[in-house]
Image (spheres, helix red, strand yellow):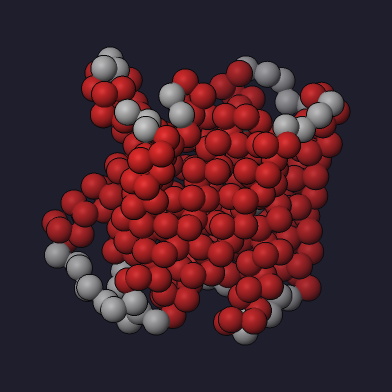
Amino acid sequence: MAYIFSLAGSLFFSYASIYYTKYSRSQSSLWMNICKSGVALLAGALWLSLSASWSFESSWYYFFISGLLGLGIGDYLLLFAFSRLGAARTMILWGFQPLLIGVGSYYLFAQPISLRQLVAILLFIGCIGIFSYEKRRSDGHWGFVGLFAALGAVTLDAGATIISRYGFEHSVNLNVFEGQFYRSLGALLSFFFLSLWLKPKFFKTFFHMPLKEKYFIVFISFIGTFLAIYCGLYAIKIGHLSTIAALTITAPLFTAIFEHIHERKKPPLSFLVAIILFIIGFILLLKS
C-alpha cells in the first residue's frame, strides 16, 4: 500500500510540475509556490474541520519545521530550478535523494537496506543517469545557478522527509491530513519572509487572470501539492523510508512522460530503456 501511495504522489507532482514550470517562468517561482501551498493549506483545513479529526498533538512542530525547510525553502529552490533548467532536467537530480534518506533512516530509525532494495535504488538511479546523459548530449551544458538550486532542493527535501517520519514516530493520534496542514503552514511562513524581500504581488496578479486560468492554477495546485503531499506523507508514515525514497525518484520518469505527451515528441530509445529499468526495479521492491 505504501508503494502505491508513493507512486501516486510522484504522478500527481510530475503532472503538475509541467505547469509549475510554466508559471514559474511567466510569474516567478515564489508566486507559484505561494499559490500551491496556499491551496494545500486551505484544502487541509477544510478537510480536518469537516471530518473533526484535529488532534493538536504536541509533536506538530516536526511537520511545521519539515514544511518550512522542504515544502518552503526546498520547493522555492526547486521551482527556481524548473524555471532555469526545465522540469525533467531538474528532476534528474532527485536520484541523489535515496542515498541521503537511506543514510539518515539507517542511523535514526535503524532501518537497514536489503540487497533487493539496494539493487532497485541503483536501477532507479540508472534511469536518472540515462536522462542525464540524454539531456547533456542534446543541450551540451548545464546552468550552474539552476543546478545548485536543484541540489539544494533535493538536500532540503531529504531532510524534511526524515523530520516528517520522526514526527510520525512521536505522534500517536496525529493523522496524515493534519501533518500535511502543518507542513503547508510552515511553507507559507517561509514564503511570507521571502515576500518581504522579493515582493511577488501574488493577489494582484492572481485576480487579474482570466477565470478559467484561475481555476486551472487552483486545480494543479490541489493535485500537485495537497494530494501529492498527502500520498507522500502516508507512504512515509507506513512504509520503509529508504524504499519510499527510491520510489520518489521515479518522478523524473513520470515528468519526462508528461513532457513527451505535452510537447507531442516521439520518445527516444534511451527513454524506453529507462522504462525497462524502472519496471525491473519496481518488481524488486514489491518482492522485498
Of the pair 200 and 15, the residue shown nearer to us: 200
Quadrant of the rendered structure where residue 207 is?
A: top left
What residue is at 39 percent from the left and 51 percent from the top?
190
Of the pair 49 and 238, the residue shown nearer to us: 49
What residue is at 55 percent from the left and 57 percent from the top?
157
What residue is at 66 percent from the left and 31 percent from the top?
85
Q: Is residue 47 above or below residue 166?
A: above
The picture places residue 240, in percent across and down from the top left corner, at 58, 72
Give the total number of marks visible in the rendering.
Answer: 0
Q: Is residue 210 visible?
A: yes
The picture places residue 96, in percent across and down from the top left corner, at 71, 55
Q: Is residue 157 above or below residue 274?
A: below
Q: Is residue 43 above or below residue 220?
A: below
The picture places residue 155, in percent across and down from the top left corner, at 62, 57
- Residue sticking out furthest to the front: 197
The picture places residue 215, in percent across and down from the top left corner, at 28, 26
Of the pair 22 and 253, the residue shown nearer to us: 22
Quadrant showing the C terminus:
bottom right
In the picture, measured across the screen, residue 218 lies left or right of residue 232, that is left
Quadrant of the rendered structure where residue 221 is?
A: top left
In the picture, measured across the screen, residue 90 lies left or right of residue 71, that is right
What residue is at 66 percent from the left and 58 percent from the top?
97
In the picture, measured across the screen, residue 287 lies left or right of residue 77, that is right
